Image: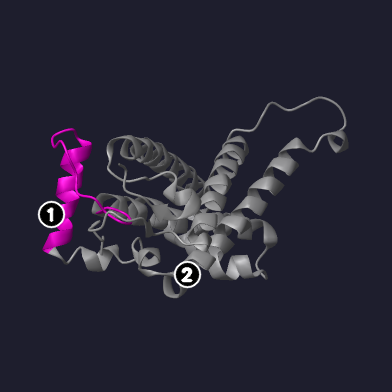
């Protein structure tokens, strides 16, 4: 569960693979959001021979490439859930933590702090309970939804004999209402992750300024350092 800060010494929280995953995924989300927007709302057609212009094709290629990197790094992050330190497991075990009253007390306490109804918050070595909940329900589940729906749409182009079609398209399309509905859900999922990103960035900067420990630099060098 969320580990409260009980020492005034620096604590090594985020290992190198976790930090690399964080920044690669952040970059992928930016690329996927921008290219995905233009795929859903294409630029005006250009005049001339079609073979002279392949802009949307390049946009789609970049989107698909970023999607593969996004998926691979999420799989690596799931592997590091078992290979990493205890902090690497925090965002994956939220359903089990929800059974603990102490976790809910920490969640409410952190919520009151973020709502400016409480002057000080508890100090945590890793994620606080509210951050854990946001990372699990918004980021992790949102990412999995985008991967599943994205590969389901991709499988339409690769065809019925492809692994994308077999693993995703064959069951996602009937479940969510065929192609156009899946496009819509995938598009809404993009805005869901954008909303998470806006909230995440705001709270990270706010916490780095107002809390008693470093936050942003911790995702750069891995160390949670108490401020003087």
- Crowd rating for badge 1 (residues with CA inside 10 Å; few <14, some 14–19, many 20+): few
The magenta stretch is 101-128
Residue 178 percent coordinates (x, y): 50, 54
Going from the N terminus, do you reach mark 2 or mark 1 first?
2
Name the residue at the bottom extreme.
82
The reply to whether dot 2 and dot 1 touch (C-beta < 8 Å) is no
The residue singled out by tag 1 in the image is: 105
**Mark pair 2, 1: CA separation:** 28 Å
Q: Please name the residue that numbered disc 2 is placed on.
A: 80
- For the residue pair 107 and 195, the one nearer the viewer reads as 107
User: Which mark is drawn over residue 47?
Assistant: none
Q: Is residue 51 left or right of residue 89?
A: right
Q: Is residue 41 above or below residue 8?
A: above
**Where is residue 23 drawn, in percent x and y?**
53, 49
User: How many residues crowd around disc 2 within 10 Å: few (fewer than 14), some, or many (20 or more)?
Assistant: some
Q: Quadrant of the C terminus?
A: top left
What percent of the width, then of the height, locates residue 129?
24, 54
Give the camera-side residue of 93 and 164.
93
């Amino acid at each position: 569960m969320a580990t409260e800060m009980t020492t005034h010494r620096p604590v090594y929280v985020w290992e190198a693979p976790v930090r690399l995953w964080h920044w690669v995924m952040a970059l992928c989300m930016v690329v996927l959001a921008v290219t995905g927007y233009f795929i859903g709302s294409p630029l005006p057609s250009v005049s001339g021979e079609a073979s002279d212009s392949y802009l949307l094709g390049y946009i789609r290629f970049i989107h698909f490439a970023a999607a593969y990197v996004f998926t691979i790094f999420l799989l690596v992050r799931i592997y590091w859930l078992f290979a990493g330190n205890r902090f690497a497991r925090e965002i994956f075990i939220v359903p089990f933590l929800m059974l603990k009253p102490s976790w809910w007390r920490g969640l409410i306490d952190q919520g009151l702090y973020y709502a400016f109804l409480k002057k000080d918050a508890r100090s945590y070595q890793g994620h606080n309970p509210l951050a854990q909940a946001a990372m699990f329900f918004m980021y992790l589940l949102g990412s999995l939804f985008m991967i599943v729906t994205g590969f389901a749409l991709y499988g339409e182009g690769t065809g019925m004999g492809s692994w994308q079609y077999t693993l995703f398209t064959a069951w996602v399309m009937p479940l969510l209402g065929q192609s156009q509905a899946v496009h819509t859900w995938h598009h809404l999922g993009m805005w869901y992750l954008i909303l998470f990103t806006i909230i995440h960035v705001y709270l990270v900067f706010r916490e780095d300024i107002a809390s008693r420990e470093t936050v942003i630099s911790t995702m750069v060098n891995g160390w949670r350092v108490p401020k003087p």
